């Protein structure tokens, strides 16, 4: 795949490369090494002007090729071999899924999300298209925030369910899509099949074929032109406006659903990670959730003010120590970790062989890291990325254990399971068991500031003292106060709870009236740790089994007096 180069740049670039190739061949001749090329280049100074003309000509030819590409190559064609290979792969996947013309997939009850919704007594399904975990986190929070007696959401991964069942949603049911845009306007991996079905023509989605949905038994025959005419949905997109195809994934899905007859509830939300995606999400949610309640006849739902049930149930257990994952192990434990089994779901545990500070005396903290892939059967090429699961610092982990009162039980084996038997994710951590310490060190991101919505839904309901309610209430209700205290102060979950404890101590709050956050809520307050993607800075030709990363360690200086008096001081590493 050609990464980070848009099509409008690709054709001139190819032309320019042709010109350079002609220059090397005509002016210098073939050579076996860079050194040889350099030596020969010094002997052809008289030909430089002609070579420059060839380069310019190549760029001009490439630009003309781009401008007239449709006339030369036909609509939607791409000269690039890797793009052609990707298109062929996508076409094969679509055919296998029944999305290609003339194909009809077999009905699979296990992948019928409408049947699962009804069996679970749910009337809203929330699908997330997530690449790094943010959209999944937003979808999970949305499901919990809208939960009430009349709104019963089920959060699902679309990769596990058939898009053909979408037409089966009834008039008193609703689908919500929370979709991140990946790369240059592409769908996330777990939405690939759905996106290809809805937008079979990626270049011109409005010209896409009408997909063939399963005929629901409880509905009249579907309209061949508007098969989703009885379906209602809402959509929120996650993107970054520094990319040309801003929120393209959500925009295309929204447009195709409407073209197929579906009715959108509210406006399409568009979050901008370059500005304030949390605030964008909060505004969209505040405007859309009441419309969803109204659509489902739950506008006056008396249960909506109730505190939703916890998502997770935490149990301290006795188990064989060899089955307790304490070192950041990944995978679900259901398959042997053979080379063929390594994937994004079962990462390879690779040792770090080199870690060098390249700027020991500079202001920027730049690291050179080498990772050994020996035994993984993995191969990499130029332009690839490597996903790294980071570990939280000892100080941050210890503070989290302290504010939750878990110091004496930090290494106790625990099992964490979903309270909803129909939830898509039944376990929070991989393996049969882990410990409190390992959970906060390896599996949860405890280093990010706490969003306003999380303070309101997960922390504030447990505040019993007036001092804690006043402090947390202002952070939850006032955007500017949250930015000034939590954002500028780098208040992670542990630091936020430590700040509450200091405020309650100063106010003389008695021990039994102090805020005590349940562990299950603390787990929910933290997003699951996701792999950080880094561009590979080494060459597979030189080190085929060793990958190099060159990365900058970011540090944030807290800007508030409150933060400077917290246990970890005013600075945190990001």
Image (tube, rainbow, N blue to C red):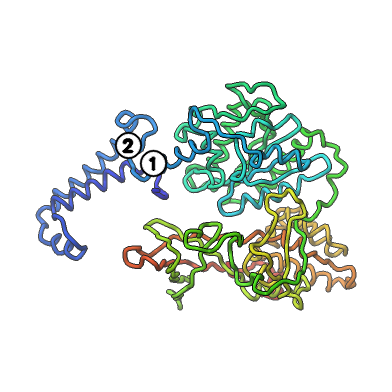
Residue beneath the point at 18% across and 61% down: 32
x and y percentages locating residue 72 in the rendered image = 29, 30
Dividing the image into 4 quarters, which one contains the C terminus?
A: bottom right
- Left or right for 370, reference 107: left
- Residues marked 1 and 2 touching at CB (< 8 Å): yes
The residue shown at (73%, 47%) is: 143
- In this picture, residue 71 sits left or right of residue 202: left
Few, some or many C-alpha atoms within 10 Å of disc 2 (few <14, some 14-19, many ≥20)?
A: many
- Residue 333 appears anywhere in the view: yes
Query: Where is mark 1, residue-wise?
Result: 7
Q: Is residue 515 above or below residue 424?
A: below
The tag on residue 571 is none
Q: Quadrant of residue 284?
A: top right
Find residue 84 and report its horizontal and vertical position in percent. Answer: 37, 41
Callout 1: 10 Å neighbours few (<14), some, many (20+)? few
Residue 484 visible (yes or no): no
Q: Quadrant of residue 261?
A: top right
Q: Residue at x 70, y 71 (%)?
A: 435
Q: Which mark is residue 66?
A: 2
Residue 457 lies, in percent from the top left, at 77, 54
**Left or right: where 421 falls relative to 106:** right
Nearer to us in this view, 63 or 565: 63
């Amino acid at each position: 795949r050609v990464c980070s180069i848009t099509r409008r740049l690709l054709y001139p670039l190819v032309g320019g490369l042709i010109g350079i190739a002609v220059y090397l061949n005509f002016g210098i001749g073939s050579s076996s090494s860079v050194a040889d090329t350099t030596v020969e280049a010094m002997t052809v100074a008289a030909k430089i002007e002609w070579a420059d003309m060839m380069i310019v000509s190549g760029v001009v030819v490439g630009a003309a090729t781009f401008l007239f590409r449709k006339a030369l190559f036909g609509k939607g064609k791409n000269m690039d071999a890797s793009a052609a290979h990707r298109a062929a792969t996508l076409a094969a996947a679509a055919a296998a899924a029944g999305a290609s013309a003339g194909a009809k997939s077999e009905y699979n009850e296990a992948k019928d999300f409408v049947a699962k919704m009804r069996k679970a007594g749910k009337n809203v399904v929330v699908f997330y298209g997530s690449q790094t975990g943010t959209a999944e986190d937003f979808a999970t929070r949305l499901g919990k925030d809208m939960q009430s007696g009349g709104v019963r959401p089920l959060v699902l991964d679309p990769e596990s369910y058939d898009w053909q069942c979408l037409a089966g949603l009834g008039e008193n049911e609703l689908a919500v899509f929370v979709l991140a845009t990946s790369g240059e306007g592409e769908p996330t991996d777990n939405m690939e099949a759905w996106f290809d079905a809805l937008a079979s023509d990626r270049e011109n989605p409005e010209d896409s074929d009408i997909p063939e949905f399963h005929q629901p038994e409880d509905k009249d025959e579907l309209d061949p032109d508007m098969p989703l005419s009885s379906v209602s949905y809402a959509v929120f997109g996650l993107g970054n406006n520094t990319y040309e195809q801003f929120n393209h994934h959500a925009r295309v899905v929204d447009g195709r659903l409407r073209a197929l007859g579906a009715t959108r509830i509210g406006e399409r939300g568009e979050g901008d990670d370059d500005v304030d995606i949390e605030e964008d999400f909060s505004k969209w949610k505040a405007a859309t959730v009441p419309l969803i309640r109204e659509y489902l006849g739950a506008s006056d739902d008396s249960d909506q003010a109730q505190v939703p049930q916890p998502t997770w149930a935490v149990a301290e257990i006795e188990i064989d120590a060899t089955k307790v994952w304490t070192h950041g192990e990944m995978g679900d434990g259901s398959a042997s970790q053979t080379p063929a089994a390594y994937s994004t779901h079962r990462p390879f545990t690779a040792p770090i062989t080199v870690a060098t500070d390249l700027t020991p005396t500079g202001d920027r903290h730049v690291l050179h890291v080498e990772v050994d892939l020996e035994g993984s059967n993995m191969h990499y090429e130029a332009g690839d990325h490597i996903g790294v699961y980071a570990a939280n610092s000892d100080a941050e982990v210890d503070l989290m254990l302290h504010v939750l009162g878990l110091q004496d039980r930090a290494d106790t084996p625990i099992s964490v399971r979903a309270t909803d038997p129909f939830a898509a994710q039944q376990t929070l951590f991989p393996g049969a068991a882990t410990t409190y310490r390992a959970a906060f060190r390896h599996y949860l991101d405890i280093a990010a500031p706490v969003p306003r919505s999380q303070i309101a839904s997960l922390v504030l309901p447990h505040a019993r003292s007036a001092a804690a309610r006043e402090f947390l209430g202002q952070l939850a209700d006032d955007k500017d106060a949250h930015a000034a205290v939590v954002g500028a102060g780098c208040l992670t979950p542990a630091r936020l709870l430590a700040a509450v404890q200091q405020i309650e101590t100063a106010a003389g709050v008695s021990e039994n009236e102090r805020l005590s956050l349940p562990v299950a809520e603390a787990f929910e307050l933290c997003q699951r740790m996701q792999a950080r993607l880094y561009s590979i800075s080494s060459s597979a030709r030189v080190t085929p089994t060793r990958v190099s990363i060159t990365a900058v360690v970011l540090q944030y200086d807290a800007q508030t007096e409150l933060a400077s008096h917290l246990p970890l001081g005013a600075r945190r590493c990001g």
